Image (spheres, helix red, strand yellow):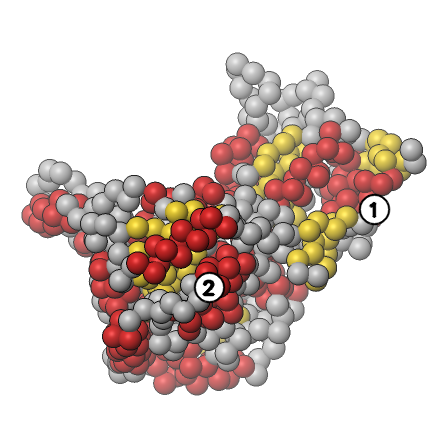
Amino acid sequence: MKTKRLTVAQATIGYLKNQYVERDGVEHSFFAGCFGIFGHGNVAGLGQALHQDLDFKYYQCRNEQAMVHTAVAYAKVKNRLGAFACTTSIGPGATNMVTGAALATVNRLPVLLLPGDIFARRNVAPVLQQIEMPFTQEHGANDAFKPVSRYWDRINRAEQLITSLPEAMRVLISQGDTGAVTLAMPQDVQTEAFDFPEHLFAKKVWPIARPRPDKTLVARASEWIRSSKRPMIITGGGTIYSEATDALRAFVRQTGIPVAETMAGKGGLRYDDPCNLGAAGVTGTEGANVVAAEADLVIGIGTRYSDFTTASKTAWQDPNVRFVNINITDFDAFKHGALPLVGDARVVLEELAAALEGYAVEDAYRARMAEWNASWDQVVEKVYHLNHGVPVSQGEVIGAVNDAADERDIVLCAAGSLPGDLHKLWRTRDPKGYHLEYGYSCMGYEIAGGLGAKLADPSREIYVMVGDGSYLMMAQEIATAIQEGIKLTVVLLNNHGFGSIGGLSTYVGSQRFGTQYRYRDAQTGQLDGERLPVDLAANARSLGAHVIECTDIASVRKALQEAKGIKQTTVIYVETDLFQGVDGYTWWEVPVAEVSEVETVQAASQEYEKNRQRQRYYL
């Protein structure tokens, strides 16, 4: 057997750059490169390997969590057919990635994490940034990745890499079980040389299959659908990742079954499709929630049924409602006691459409769905042109961005009150046009995620919409965008606090306590003094962005047009009204204190108990 003498780090990079995937006859490299911040845990190992092997592109970033967010956004736009590796030093550099790992795993998006680790030899312990355990020498800081990774391993011996790397790839390319894959790498092992088999570094093409469903279950699902009177579809991220949007559109045109979209599934249909009810669940439209309450059959496609989608198990109120779930993984396919059609969303829809030949919902039902679609678009139009004055309303800014964006452009967001408004209001015209990280709803994802989306598809303009709360948590990747010559249009909305949680605080009776950015008042002793004089526009400018400061909605619209002609990352800054929101149409469970001296909490508790009576077990 021919061998090649390399360090463990060099072998890792040599292997990664030769991994390819193929779906539907299209083959391409799986890894786009490696993000990294170097320290004593990886500078002499993976840092040296990346310096030596320039074929595997290295990207510098400013924050370890942020680079994982960038990698996740890249994988999302690539429909899980591409990924990045991320490497850090040991200790804080590594554990900074734990949040990013959780985000990747929750959203079922592939990212390879290569955190540096303590000496495998142990003879120099405790080393800098080592967490010591008095009961074992086996555990370290990188064990924190175990519960948030889909695959985890520690490479204590060079030859372990030969079997660990293929297992890591198996999980990364899985359409159902992917997420964060962590290979913890002790800093001494990274630099050790070993005679690796040459064929480990040969080009490897991993096929991405489209599993077909069980024929008997497809026939039974067809019977259930034919016998239903008020069916509906909940379309999730799996529809888009499997590139099933054309199949969904054809299925809906054939059957007339209406569709409501999850956060990850928005874009499964165009916003103006007459069968599109819009957003589902807690952040959903009126029509979607009315139809859900009456539905006797729910067809879930590529959804994991989060509490936002199910309105905390209150969405479907028909006592005999049944579920048919189309999903690549049986874990989600069996939820809600469903008839499980386990397989690729595209092929399952195609086979189910064939089984339903000649079937369609009643004309009156289809017409009612078209009315819901049209009436909601009138609501959107009204919010887009509210003429709220100064400060502007958030809905008006969303409308301005939507009007400015071309059909294939991407709006990207993650946390705060913006996702709920975007879910209801964004007029999606392309399956990739709406990019929301809402599985983990991680503050700080936005700008880093914008980088990943742009790297995945440079032909699209990326509109990052971010509130002041998220911006203050992770704005530094603007510098990375400047360094790489990446153009983002960042729309920065400042309402001087945490708008979403402020609203939730009001709902549970806590009167927005601790959610606004204010001085501590000497008289009250509380954070209810004057607003803090933080200049976010100046901050963005200091990071290298071109900044346009706006006051009213007309200036926002003008800035968006101006930004189209600017080649560098541009931040459009505007203040918004904290209290001007968009109506909600259903309930989300957030427990309220059972006893309190505060009257507003007492009232919220009574309302909470009333809403809980509507919760259902879907068995």
- Residue 200 horizontal side relative to residue 362, left or right: right
Give the amino acid type for the residue marked by disc 2 in the picture: Ala
Provide the residue designation for mark 2. Answer: 353
Residue 377, by quadrant, is bottom left
Q: Position of residue 28 (x, y in %)?
A: 72, 59
Q: Label 2: state its secondary structure.
A: helix
- Residue visible at 63% across and 32% down in the picture: 153
Residue 360, by quadrant, is bottom left
Quadrant into which the C terminus falls:
top left
Is residue 420 something that shows in the picture?
no
Residue 575, by quadrant, is bottom left
Is residue 56 something that shows in the picture?
yes
* Nearer-N-terminus badge (2/1): 1
- Residue 577 horizontal side relative to residue 352, left or right: left
Provide the residue designation for mark 1. Answer: 202
Disc 1 packing (10 Å; few <14; some 14–19; many ≥20): few
